[in-house]
Image: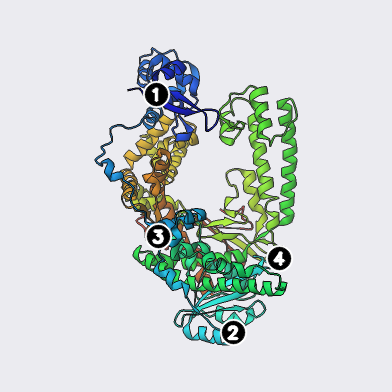
């Protein structure tokens, strides 16, 4: 049987037919040997890694000479090859990668297929489900094309068609009914308010309130009567049920109102149900849980009415548009009530209600207050630091020009690539479609080739410092408070960690001195100090407790140096003889295990070969058998049930483990191993923050939490409250949870953030 494969060339329409003879003529090998070529060369489109540094030309010549990857390595082992230098070194070092890549490139012809062709006959669609997916993906034209508009409506949608009675009650009547019900299901609409001193440059325009008992909804314009709502919003006995309550907290605080009685945020409930879902706005949640497309209910039905005809005045048109907006806001309020019912039931089934009520909901108030408090910035010192960086940049630019022998744009990848790889003839590590790659990884590998590389790396560090952490911080300094009020989020990361934006204060560099100096400009106000509390090795302590590994538990219980212990076991060295380098390597393995590091990643980090890195990891897992068992069990659990959980039942689904793509599956395996550790550590930190915040409130102290960075909490404290707050922090943090090993919080105080710890 002759097999011909049409292959596109020069575009999508022109094809070339390949058969066995054409492969032999073009490549000088049999068709089946292309698998070996791919094993050496790799294929980025299929995520086949190949052997680093081996391209198509080299791979072909090797297979033409040796016939197969197996024969190539057999000749190398017998010393019968003629490979030399770095090429030989790379091929020898990446033997496992070559064989893995060959396996990935081969079509498996031995899969046991029990099904017959009849089993693969196309069946009738589940039209409601297809409609739901198409709407979520905005495939609107396909909805009509496949006649999905005729799909029978769900009960929820039918109910929503007549979801409320619009009532005409006074604001006073509504307020009194809320006080009676002690529950407020609502949606707040806002308008822009560009006052420079505002933290969020919006103000409340109106509020939609849904009365679940009477199935009544009303929209009230309260832009100028917000004070009338103060007693409602500040009453802790009235349960507040809504969405984006953290934002509302700030908006009300800007009107001197403190939001209390925060009970249910449908966005946070939805995040817990699926932490990788980044569509948590009201309209996306309506589509997800209620199959409600806002345009179906509001937009399309009223499209004709929105168009101003010849006989209408502009005022009449604007009035109709306002009515439509109010109709939409009322639908939001109703939907919040329905979504609460659905998500609460799902949280109960997942055993996540306690997590929601005791950790994530109380965190709203803590994070909102952190944003309100902000961190004071010494602008004069920030400007001075900027001048210092600018001066250093000017000096280093001259050095680079001198080394290069000409002036050029150092920030231009194209110009830098020409200087390094064409003029200076440095070895090309990686090429992209647009030319030579000059990313950090490439430059790090070229460090030993020429001293200009060190200068370029330093130039880039200085540029980033100046643009991101000097000039980049200035726009965020509030002109009234002189503080930066960063936004803190609890629904962004898949592990439950808190994140920071506008600006990201968690990302200020600490690994090199000049970068760390940015922290010097953050200071407490006069008469106050910063108290910093940092969990000591919390993720390793969580790992010890979850895995039950006896060696790690013993080290933490006895207060041993966990990294020295690991070095002693991995390198078979008495603990007192462990060198600094051995401890450093063991530390990288310890933390690498937490983050699911690969032998390739560890090798890159330590500057050692992949084989040596794998040896370190294998030796570590042999010594710490409990950890090895935990890693295996977590991966298997994720494969079998589709998710993993923290100790507090925070769940993360890992569909990546079922992917056909090897690299995606590897990511899934790492996520399965590190999510229970990182997620549990994040939950512990939230519990600690809630307890510290509540204790400060209960004691009537003036101290304020101003920042949280992963395992670290920073509080701005009046000097006279120093000892009391230190005691609160240590007690609350170390008793946040009872693990098999003790939690340790390290406390320090300073006059600026830089000096903490």
In-front residue for pair 661/548? 661
First-in-chain label (3 vs 2):
3
In-front residue for pair 447/194? 194
Tag 1: Cα neighbours inside 10 Å, few (<14), some, or many (≥20)?
A: many
Between disc 4 and disc 3, the foreground one is: 3
Tag 2: Cα neighbours inside 10 Å, few (<14), some, or many (≥20)?
A: some
Residue 159 picture quarter: bottom left
Residue identified by numbered label 2? 171
Residue 158 picture quarter: bottom left
**Which residue is found at the position 60% from the left and 64% from the top?**
371
Numbered circle sitting on residue 36: 1
Q: How is the image coloured?
A: rainbow
Numbered circle sitting on residue 219: none
Tag 3: Cα neighbours inside 10 Å, few (<14), some, or many (≥20)?
A: some
Q: Secondary structure at mark 4?
A: loop
Between disc 4 and disc 2, the foreground one is: 2
Residue 251 picture quarter: bottom right
The image shows residue 675 at horizontal and vertical percentages of 41, 51
**Which residue is found at the position 45% from the left and 51% from the top?**
537
Q: On screen, 669 above or below 362?
A: above
Residue identified by numbered label 3? 128
First-in-chain label (2 vs 1):
1
Q: On screen, 486 above or below 249?
A: above
Residue identified by numbered label 4? 194
């Amino acid at each position: 049987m002759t097999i011909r494969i049409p292959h596109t060339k020069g575009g999508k329409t022109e094809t070339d037919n390949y058969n066995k003879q054409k492969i032999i003529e073009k490549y000088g090998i049999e068709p089946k040997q292309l698998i070996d070529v791919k094993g050496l060369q790799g294929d980025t489109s299929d995520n086949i890694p190949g052997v680093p540094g081996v391209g198509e030309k080299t791979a072909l010549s090797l297979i033409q000479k040796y016939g197969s990857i197996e024969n190539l390595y057999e000749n190398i082992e017998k010393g019968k090859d003629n490979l030399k230098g770095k090429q030989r070194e790379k091929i020898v070092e990446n033997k496992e990668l070559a064989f893995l890549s060959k396996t990935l490139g081969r079509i498996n012809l031995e899969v046991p297929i029990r099904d017959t062709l009849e089993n693969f006959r196309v069946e009738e669609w589940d039209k409601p489900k297809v409609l739901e997916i198409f709407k979520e993906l905005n495939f609107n034209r396909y909805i009509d094309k496949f006649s999905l508009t005729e799909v029978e409506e769900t009960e929820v949608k039918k109910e929503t068609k007549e979801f409320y009675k619009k009532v005409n009650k006074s604001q006073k009547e509504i307020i009194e009914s809320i006080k009676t019900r002690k529950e407020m299901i609502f949606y707040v609409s806002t308008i822009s308010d560009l006052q420079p001193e505002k933290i969020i440059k919006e103000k409340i325009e109106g509020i939609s309130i849904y009365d679940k008992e009477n199935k009544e909804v009303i929209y009230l314009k309260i832009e100028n009567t917000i004070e009338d709502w103060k007693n409602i919003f500040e009453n802790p006995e009235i349960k507040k049920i809504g969405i984006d309550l953290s934002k509302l907290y700030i908006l009300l605080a800007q009107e001197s109102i403190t939001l209390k009685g925060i009970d249910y945020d449908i966005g946070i409930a939805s995040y817990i149900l699926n932490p990788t879902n980044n569509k948590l706005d009201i309209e996306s949640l309506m589509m997800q849980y209620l199959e409600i497309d806002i345009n179906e209910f509001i937009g399309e039905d009223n499209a004709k009415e929105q168009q101003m005809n010849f006989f209408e005045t502009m005022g009449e048109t604007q009035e109709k548009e306002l009515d439509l907006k109010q109709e939409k806001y009322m639908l939001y309020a109703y939907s919040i009530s329905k979504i609460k019912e659905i998500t609460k039931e799902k949280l109960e089934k997942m055993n996540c209600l306690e997590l929601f009520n005791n950790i994530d909901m109380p965190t709203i108030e803590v994070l909102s207050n952190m944003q309100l408090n902000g961190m004071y910035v010494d602008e004069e010192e920030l400007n001075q630091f900027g001048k210092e960086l600018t001066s250093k940049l000017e000096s280093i630019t001259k050095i680079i020009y001198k080394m290069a022998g000409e002036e050029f744009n150092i920030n231009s990848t194209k110009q830098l690539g020409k200087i390094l790889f064409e003029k200076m003839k440095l070895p090309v590590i990686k090429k992209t479609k647009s030319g030579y790659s000059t990313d950090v990884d490439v430059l790090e590998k070229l460090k030993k080739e020429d001293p200009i590389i060190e200068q370029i790396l330093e130039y880039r560090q200085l540029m980033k410092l100046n643009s991101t952490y000097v000039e980049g911080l200035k726009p965020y300094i509030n002109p009234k408070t002189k503080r930066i009020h960063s936004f803190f989020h609890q629904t962004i990361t898949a592990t439950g960690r808190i994140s920071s934006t506008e600006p990201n204060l968690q990302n200020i560099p600490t690994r090199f001195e000049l970068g760390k100096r940015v922290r010097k400009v953050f200071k407490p106000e006069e008469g106050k100090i910063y108290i910093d509390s940092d969990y000591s090795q919390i993720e390793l302590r969580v790992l010890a407790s979850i895995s039950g590994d006896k060696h790690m538990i013993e080290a933490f219980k006895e207060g041993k140096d966990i990294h020295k212990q690991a070095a002693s076991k991995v390198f078979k060295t008495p603990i007192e003889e462990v060198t600094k380098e051995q401890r450093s390597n063991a530390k990288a393995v310890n933390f690498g295990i937490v983050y699911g590091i690969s032998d390739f990643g560890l090798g890159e980090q330590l500057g050692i070969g992949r084989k040596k890195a794998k040896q370190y990891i294998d030796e570590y897992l042999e010594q710490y058998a409990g950890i090895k068992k935990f890693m295996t069990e977590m991966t298997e659990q994720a494969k079998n049930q589709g998710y993993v959980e923290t100790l507090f039942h925070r769940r993360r689904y890992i569909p990546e483990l079922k992917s056909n793509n090897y690299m995606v599956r590897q990511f899934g395996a790492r996520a399965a191993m590190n999510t229970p550790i990182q997620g549990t550590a994040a939950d512990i930190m939230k519990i600690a923050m809630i307890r510290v915040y509540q204790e400060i409130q209960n004691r009537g102290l003036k101290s304020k939490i101003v920042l949280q960075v992963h395992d670290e909490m920073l509080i701005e404290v009046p000097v006279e409250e120093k000892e009391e707050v230190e005691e609160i922090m240590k007690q609350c943090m170390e008793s946040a949870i009872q693990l098999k090993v003790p939690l340790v919080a390290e406390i320090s105080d300073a006059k600026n953030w830089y000096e903490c710890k």
